[in-house]
Amino acid sequence: MSVVTQTSPRTGRFSEAALLIISVGIGVGAFCLAHLGAEEGGLPSSLPVILVGSVAIAIVGHMVIRHFASYADPVLFPSALALNGLGLAMIYRIDMASGTDQVKNQLVLTVAAIVLMVITVVALRNHRALRRYTWTSLFVGIGLLLLPMVPGLGRTINGARIWIRLVGFSFQPAEFAKICFAVFFAGYLVSERDNLSLAGPKFLGMRLPLARHFVPILTAWAICMGVLVMERDFGTAILFFGLFVGMLYVATERISWIVIGGLLATVGVALIYQVTPHIQARFVIWLHALDSNVYNDKHGSYQIVQGLFGMGSGGLFGTGLGQGYPTKVYAANSDFIVASFGEEIGLIGLLALLCIYLMIIVRGLRTAIVLRDGFGKLLVTGLAFTIALQCFVVVGGVTRVIPLTGLAMPFLAHGGSALLANWTIIGILIRISDVARRPAAADPLPPEDVLNVIPALEKETGSQTANDSTKTQVVKL
């Protein structure tokens, strides 16, 4: 039991408006600097359209949040908008250097993604209702993962079969599967956390689970390893299994689950490495990137080494937006957009960029701490972990901390699937943060966990009614 106290009844909308001004300034300013750095002459002719469009998007998003989620966290929307604006500026800069025109497509996808965020904020009036779809979310998530394996629908790109093609558009269904799995893990763990944290024998000071409670983690492990084998998608496997183990630890507070998860992941990758040539090649590139034979191989380490050279040439402060050579790296606007930023804004700028991600993650975890229901706590934690794990996998791959994967850097990289999914996550976080920050007396929906506790309290005390203050303050974690 814990007592929840509301310390700040302020809505935060004024702070959000001020931060949105800064976010729009960051995006538009980066666009202008990229143009000035790459082209001789004045400001871009499309600047008025870009400025008006950016301001309109910020105002619409702000007004929707102000009306439908007035107590939402004021940092989430501006942070995501700033990252998205920076990503568009870098894609525009690479378009100028390479002669492509991908930024227009990304602009359309950005508008569609923010509209999807707005729909999420408006439609998801009660996040606790998602708990009813715990097992449905699991089946939908598995179905989305398996879609690329359907003959005639799936596509293999760069050795990974993670794409489907519909009516002329390519789509990664795994990007939305991560939301489904977060809902499933939150719903399952909130129901089974007592069994997972208290039951079972002790070994070397760690509480081990009972055999029947060990089945879910084995199932999650098997699904992730199956994805790795069938689709050759190392990044998605790391993301899903890391998401489950992280949420499991938060739900149980048992270090044994981290140890078990780490051992299972190590054993699984070691076994698959022996039988999957594609994974073997990824590890060879990772471990021996600077060997001449590996560098000059047809599918060797040229891409990752060029990215390292680019970041190295950027130094601490970078060459300046528009003044580097990011196009020397393959997929400079998608898989290696972090290397592109590292070259042109330097280590200091890249760390500042990662701090914006850190703000989103921290605000998500802060929402989980003050939230008044167990399911919501785990769901928000899982969604925050999803963004954190994506950043780790992408940045780790580009910097050779881990083998290179095909995940996209949230909000920055070119591509529609990840952009749509990550803006949906922001919409869910905004909606749930509104419930978390709203004063308890103003929350029309009592916490679901509390409703489960009240009948037991009434039975124990013999009372047919419970005090209103008990209903709003007692929370089962």
Image (cartoon, grey):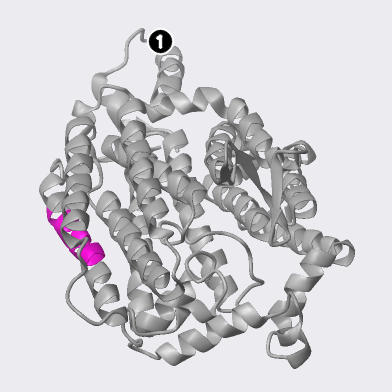
Q: What range is drawn magenta here?
A: 18-28
| Main secondary structure of the magenta stretch | helix
Percent x, y of residue 298: 75, 77
Q: Does residue 134 appear in this view?
A: yes
Residue 223 against residue 137 in the figure, above or below: below
Q: Quadrant of residue 424?
A: top left
Classify residue 215 by image quadrant. top right
Q: What SS does tag 1 mark?
A: loop
Q: Is residue 307 left or right of residue 85?
A: right
Residue at 60% across, 77% down: 401
Residue 19 is covered by the magenta coloring: yes
The residue at which mark 1 appears reads as 462
* Residue 141 found in image quarter: top right
Q: Is residue 449 visible?
A: no
Please say if 224 is above or below 317. above
Q: Above or below — where is 447 with respect to 177?
A: above
At horizontal 28% and vertical 27% (from top left) the residue drawn is: 472
Q: Is residue 86 magenta?
A: no
Residue 45: give x, y in percent of width and height.
Answer: 20, 64
Camera-side residue: 412 or 238?
412
Residue 149, x across and y down, in percent: 75, 42
Quarter of the picture containing the N terminus is top left
Residue 362 versus residue 85: which sits nearer the camera? 85
Q: How many labels were placed on the picture?
A: 1
Q: Nearer the viewer, residue 405 or 271?
A: 405
Q: Residue furthest top?
A: 464
Q: Give the residue drawn at x 37%, y 54%.
A: 104
Q: Amino acid at mark 1?
A: Gly
Q: Is residue 111 left or right of residue 174?
A: left
Q: Is residue 394 left or right of residue 143?
A: left
